[in-house]
Image: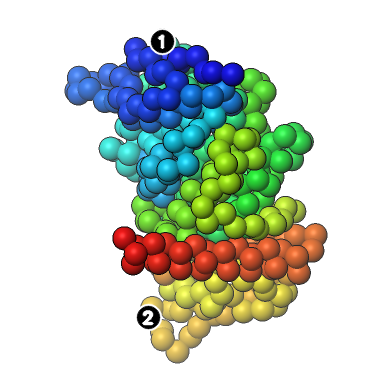
């Protein structure tokens, strides 16, 4: 069955066409116009509409790169269905980072929005009407906070089986449950019965090639599961594991922290995770020990820490051995992808 044309903003996109749009955003006090970038690939054949977006906080550089690479994939030439990709949904937040919105609050919790509300409410309304109401499936791309490096993982609601299936299709090493919060994008999409997953990896304001590769191929894996594309190049198989609980281990004192564990590493209760040194007394180091068996899924990359500041994020699993195996498979897959990419560049 053939597709029908779709409309985003004032632009119609016909079957078989691609488009890069600049969607006008609410005005700011300087009267400087701001536009939201929207990339569309509208296949000739019918299929679902997948919405992929990033940069809701303004610091998700990995997400911008993932979307740019995704939309240049050759397999989209035979696309069934539609991709609507928004690399930066919070243009104000990116331009004025670290300020997220003029009001200082987060765009993520302004949904479904209000055309007559505050700036964030107006942006949320624009996204809801022009983008999210067209979605059959949705993927958000995030990164860790400033100076927090995250192991690639997918967040979803475990209560919805279709969403869990989507999370498995992505094939990130870890899947984590997340609760629904009021006025969030997740609550909006769940009310619209749109399966929604969040991919998070890497660190704010930093490019991470492994996180980017996992993101691009993860979205392509989802598209293959949805029968939007044929099996794509460099398709690797990873069996993800569901985490039971995740929590940050906080620093017991202020000082200079140096981690002795790495992302994806399995650690035992009582194992050393790092040392905290006193900058004024080089003879004194305090060793930080794990309080349970876990997998390291997040690390604070800023050496200067305050007492009570999160420094290592630990995840527990029903079967830590299986979790370690899954993460090992993912690491091997990344090496394989890096090798293939290097070979492709050599032959070009």
Tell me which corner region of the image, top left, top right, bottom left or bottom right, holds residue 9. Answer: top left
Q: Residue at x 32, y 39 (%)?
A: 94
Q: 184 or 191: which is nearer to us?
A: 191
Indicate whether 28 appears above or below 334.
Answer: above
- Measuring from the top left, give residue 250's x and y in whole percent: 57, 63
Q: Quadrant of the C terminus?
A: bottom left
- Using the rendered image of the protein, determine whether residue 178 is visible from the camera's viewpoint: no
Q: 252 or 247: which is nearer to us?
A: 247
Q: Which mark is residue 294?
A: none
> Marks 1 and 2, Cα distance to the nearest angstrom?
55 Å
Side of 123 where 181 appears, left or right = right
- Measuring from the top left, give residue 216's x and y in whole percent: 48, 48
- Measuring from the top left, give residue 33's x and y in whole percent: 22, 22
Indicate whether 10 appears above or below 177.
Answer: above
Name the residue carrying label 1: 116
Q: 75 or 116: which is nearer to us?
A: 75
- Measuring from the top left, give residue 130's x and y in whole percent: 45, 17
Q: Which mark is residue 280?
A: 2
Q: How is the image coloured?
A: rainbow
Which tag, 1 or 2, sits closer to the chain's start?
A: 1
């Amino acid at each position: 069955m053939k597709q029908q044309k779709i409309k985003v903003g004032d632009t119609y996109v016909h079957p078989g066409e691609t488009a890069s749009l600049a969607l006008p955003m609410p005005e700011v006090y300087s009267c400087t116009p701001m536009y939201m970038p929207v990339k569309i690939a509208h296949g000739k054949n019918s299929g679902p509409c997948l919405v992929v977006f990033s940069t809701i906080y303004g610091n998700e550089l990995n997400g911008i790169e993932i979307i740019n690479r995704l939309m240049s994939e050759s397999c989209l030439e035979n696309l069934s269905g539609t991709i609507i990709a928004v690399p930066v949904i919070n243009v104000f937040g990116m331009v004025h980072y670290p300020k997220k919105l003029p009001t200082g609050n987060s765009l993520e919790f302004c949904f479904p929005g209000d055309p007559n509300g505050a700036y964030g409410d107006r942006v949320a309304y624009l996204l809801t009407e022009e983008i999210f109401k067209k979605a059959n499936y949705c993927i958000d791309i995030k990164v860790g906070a400033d100076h927090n490096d995250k192991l690639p993982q997918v967040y979803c609601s475990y209560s919805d089986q279709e969403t869990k299936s989507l999370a498995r299709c992505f094939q990130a090493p870890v899947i984590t449950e997340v609760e629904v919060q009021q006025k969030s994008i997740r609550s909006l999409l769940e009310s619209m019965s749109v399966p929604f997953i969040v991919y998070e990896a890497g660190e704010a304001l930093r490019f991470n090639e492994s996180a980017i590769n996992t993101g691009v191929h993860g979205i392509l894996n989802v598209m293959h599961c949805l029968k939007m594309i044929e099996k794509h190049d460099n398709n690797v198989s990873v069996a993800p594991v569901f985490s039971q609980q995740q929590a940050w281990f906080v620093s017991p004192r202020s000082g200079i922290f140096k981690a002795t564990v790495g992302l994806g590493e399995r650690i035992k209760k009582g194992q050393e995770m790092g040392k905290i040194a006193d900058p004024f007394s080089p003879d004194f180091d305090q060793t930080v020990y794990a309080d349970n068996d876990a997998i390291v899924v997040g690390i604070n990359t800023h050496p200067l820490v305050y007492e009570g500041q999160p420094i290592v994020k630990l995840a527990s699993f029903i079967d830590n051995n299986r979790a370690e195996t899954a993460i090992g498979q993912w690491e091997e897959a990344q090496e394989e992808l890096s090798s293939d990419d290097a070979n492709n560049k050599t032959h070009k």
